[in-house]
Image (spheres, grey):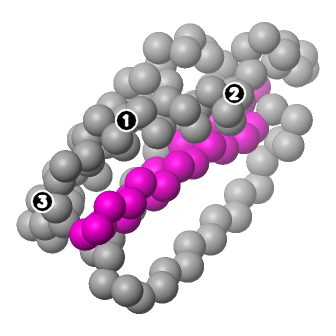
Amino acid sequence: MQRNRLASRFRPTVVQKLIHQVLVNKLAGRVYDGDECSAWTREIADEIRARLKELNLDRYKFVVQVVIGEMRGEGVKMNCRCFWDPDADNLAQDLFTNDSMFCVAAAFGVFYY
């Protein structure tokens, strides 16, 4: 099986910038609303997935996870563990915060052999 070429790899720095743009565009100026968070997470995940497809990484499958929470002065810890090919698979993530909420978005790129 041939490994993916360097030019067609999932590049975390490129994807992180893409995620950051989506988060700022979708959440800037908004105030946390628990009733709206479900719709916001869906919109953000769909937008990130659409932008990932524009990168034309045809051999990759994408998983996008978005979490929105209220800023209440409490801490939160999030972890992720993946079993994959470290030569081809990767992830990118970004964090958006304002006075009322935080949003963590992660995109996983898994090479399809």
Residue sitting at x 54%, y 32%: 17
* Residue at the far left in the pictured view: 35
Q: Please tell me which residue lies in front, 88 or 15.
A: 15
Residues tagged 3 and 2 counted as in contact (Cβ below 8 A)? no
Principal secondary structure, stretch drawn in magenta: strand
Kind of residue at disc 2: Phe
Q: Which residue is mark 3?
A: 36
Is residue 69 visible to us here? yes
Kind of residue at disc 1: Val
Image quadrant assignment for residue 99 = bottom left
Q: Which residues are magenta?
A: 89-113
Q: Please tell me which residue lies in front, 39 or 69.
A: 69
- Residue 20 screen position, x and y as percent: 46, 39
Which quadrant does the C terminus fall into?
top right
Label disc, if present, on residue 22 of the rendered structure: 1
Q: Which residue is mark 2?
A: 10
Image quadrant assignment for residue 107 = top right
Q: Locate residue 28 relative to residue 94 in the image: left or right.
A: left
